[in-house]
Image (cartoon, rainbow, N blue to C red):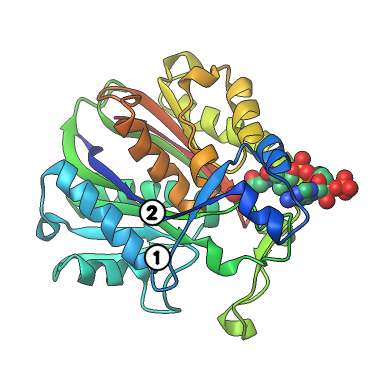
Amino acid sequence: MTIRAQVQGVGHYLPKRVVPNSEFEATIDTSDEWIRSRSGIERRHFAANDETTSDMATKAAQNALDMAGIKASDIDAIIVATSTADLTFPSAATMVQAKLGMTTGFAFDVQAVCAGFVFALATANALIVSGQVNRVIVIGAETFSRIMDWSDRTTSVLFGDGAGALILEAVEGDGTNADRGILATDLNSDGRHKDILYVDGGVSTQSTGHLKMQGKEVFRHAVEKLASTAHTALAKVNLGSDDIDWIVPHQANLRIIKSTAQKMGVGLDRVVLTVQDHGNTSAASIPLALSVGVERGQIKPGNLIVTEAIGGGLAWGAVVLRW
Ligand code: UT7
């Protein structure tokens, strides 16, 4: 008997305010043309001043619960991947737990920046296959608009806010790669690269700080590491590029997404793309893309999905799952 962490529902939430590239032209030396051609981004959503990461996470989770047809009280654990929790503590996850009216189970945050959702999925999978829980809500939620330096044109035009959620449930499988559910994971980090993508503040340095990025360097690592982690995860279960129905990549830059797909030998017609509409929403980008991919009718039950992401740390990884 093989226990699989199977997807039962997916949902997302995007804040109301949509900001087109042209809005930045008034305040910084940039253009819609530069942003589109260098990143693929056309617009992004920004949270309202009184809207927090846990608010958005709760709405995404509720949408996923509705799709799965289950109640919050049926959930054993909540994992929120975020680098922009409402408060220093408690975790955003426990705040979501309270907002969903859940009084049992447990909840915690995972922080691996843009790779956070991949790390959270792998953690949820480990809890499920080891028999510790039956149902987990895995959420990626971010308010990166709060950590932007609005005078820095090299970063402020790239990021957005939002949340996405998956419901995973323990289901018996045959132990083959034809099973529905998470089939393989691959996680990596290398703390030597801190300086190419970080926030220059935090509790123990006594400031909130702003996101700093050496874009070209991060780009170089992304192109090199994303295809490699995806191949490693696929190889663990004897699958290859031809088996993939959809790559659902972290949505940071269309050029990174294209070159990763090319390296993997997968055409762009098998890649779910949302970067144009959401910008880079860090840990929220993959669950947002999964939810939008289902809504568009791209992702269907039985499809083989590969998710891959890289971000601050550096931290990177991939998850192979059959929807
Ligand atoms: O999610 C976490 C992972 N993050 C990523 O994956 C992001 C990875 N990096 C990237 O996506 C890209 O490197 C960027 C989109 C950030 C930048 O694209 P690039 O092709 O690497 O451009 P660049 O940084 O080399 O900049 C080219 C030029 C520079 O001018 P000079 O030095 O050639 O005169 C920049 O100053 O473009 C300039 N530039 C801009 N111009 C107009 C930088 N930002 C802007 C801007 N508008 N917003």
Relative to 115, does residue 323 appear above or below in the rendering? above
> Does residue 58 sit above or below 299 in this rendering?
below
Residue at the far top: name it: 242
Q: Quadrant of the N terminus?
A: top left
Say above or below: 124 vs 94: above
Q: Where is residue 92 in the image (x, y as percent from the top left)?
A: 36, 69
Identify the secondary structure beneath mark 2.
strand
Quick one: label 1 or label 2, which is nearer the N terminus? 1
Is residue 131 at least partly visible in the picture?
no
Residue at x-position 24% and y-position 48%: 128
* In front of the other: 275 or 113: 275
User: What residue does disc 2 label?
Assistant: 163
Question: Residue at point 71% right, 38% down?
Answer: 33
Instruction: Look at the numbered discs 1 and 2 and tell me whether their residues touch, using CB distance below 8 Å.
Output: yes
Q: Which mark is residue 53?
A: 1
- Residue 306 is marked as none
In the rendered image, residue 51, in percent from the top left (x then y), is placed at 38, 69
**Is residue 311 depicted above or below 28 in this figure?**
above
Task: Say which element carries label 1.
Answer: helix
The crowd level at tag 2 (other Cα within 10 Å; few <14, some 14-19, many 20+) is many
Amino acid beneath label 2: Ala
Percent x, y of residue 231: 54, 27
Name which quarter of the figure residue 91 lies in.
Answer: bottom left
Residue at (39% x, 28% y) in the render: 305
- Image coords of residue 203 (percent x, y): 56, 82
Q: In this view, does 311 lie to the left or right of 134?
A: right
Which corner quadrant of the image does residue 168 belong to? Answer: top left
